Amino acid sequence: MRTVLRWLCGLVPLAVGLIVWELNSTADALSFPAPSSWWTAGKELASKDSLWPALRSTMETFLISMLLATILGVAAGVVIGFTPKLERALTPLIDFFRTLPPPVMVPVLTLLLGITLKASVAIVVLSVVWPILLNTISAVHEMPGIRREVARVFGLGRTEAFFKVTLPSLLPGIVVGLRTALSIGLVVTLLTDMLGSADGIGRLLVIQQQLFLPSAVWALLFVIGALGYLLNLAVQAAASFLLRRHPATQH
């Protein structure tokens, strides 16, 4: 309950800003229409069956991409982190790719891979896997050696030791990487929509902008902001649940 109240209190500045905006604008303003007009424009988009299919398409790309990036980033991070020679060999390559700004990579990857769902997923994965990978490697380095010794003493096999000892120990680092990748992933997903996809919410935003419908543009921006906020809350809740289940990971 206290956490919910804290989240609600965090929305107070936004609510105050929207009220001030409403009182100092009109629905027909060209650049900054009143927030009340966003609701009308949003309902119109929903009634035309434009909003929900676009939102579903964007979420499909985003969720599949984040799942694959998490699996690949954690798996590669564990292998690299526990193999010093491999880490030394791959560090220059990893440092090169992780320094490339994800938005810059989107146009190039779109030209190379096309604009299909598989291509969009590949673009997002290649853009967001690095924070998860690097934080997993760092978590491996910080993992106390005594935990591996305990697993060995209790006679745990490799698979059992990984899921019962190693993975819970790496959770804090993985969560940090996932939260960083979350915001990047949403931005890159929207960019893939804008630059190619015909049915994502980013593409719908571009169409409304080209039709000079500012209220619809702001309505979609509000939806995107709310979506990002809800996804962040979901990751926070999942992280709190997982870390409570593994109190030994707090070191």
Image (spheres, helix red, strand yellow):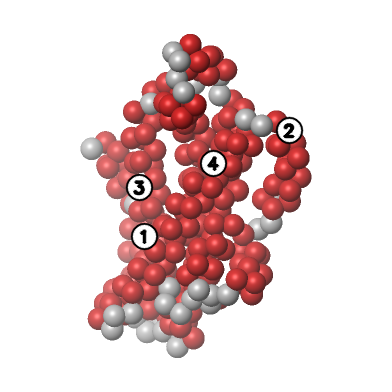
Position of the N terminus by quadrant: top left
Q: Check contact, mark 2 vs mark 3: CB within 8 A.
A: no
Front: mark 1 or 2: 2
Element type at mark 3: helix
Q: Which residue is tagged 3? A: 234
Number of residues whose C-alpha sits closer than 10 Å to that of mark 1, classed few (under 14), some (14–19) or many (20 or more)? few
Front: mark 4 or 3: 4
Element type at mark 4: helix
Amino acid type indicated by mark 4: Ala
Q: Check contact, mark 1 vs mark 2: CB within 8 A.
A: no
Separation (CA) of disc 4 from disc 2: 17 Å
Amino acid type indicated by mark 2: Lys
Q: Which residue is tagged 2? A: 85
Asked whether, in this view, residue 169 is left or right of residue 239, the answer is right
Front: mark 2 or 3: 2
Q: Check contact, mark 3 vs mark 1: CB within 8 A.
A: no
Above or below, comparing residue 200 to residue 75 in the picture: below
Q: Which residue is tagged 1? A: 226
Element type at mark 1: helix
Q: Residue at x 33, y 52 (%)?
A: 12
- Which one is earlier in the sequence, the residue at label 1 or at label 2? 2
Q: Residue at x 42, y 77 (%)?
A: 199
* Residue 121 horizontal/vertical position (percent): 50, 63
Q: Check contact, mark 4 vs mark 3: CB within 8 A.
A: no
Q: Check contact, mark 1 vs mark 4: CB within 8 A.
A: no
Q: Nearer the viewer, residue 25 or 112?
A: 112
Q: Residue 243 got which mark?
A: none
Separation (CA) of disc 2 from disc 3: 37 Å
Separation (CA) of disc 1 from disc 4: 31 Å
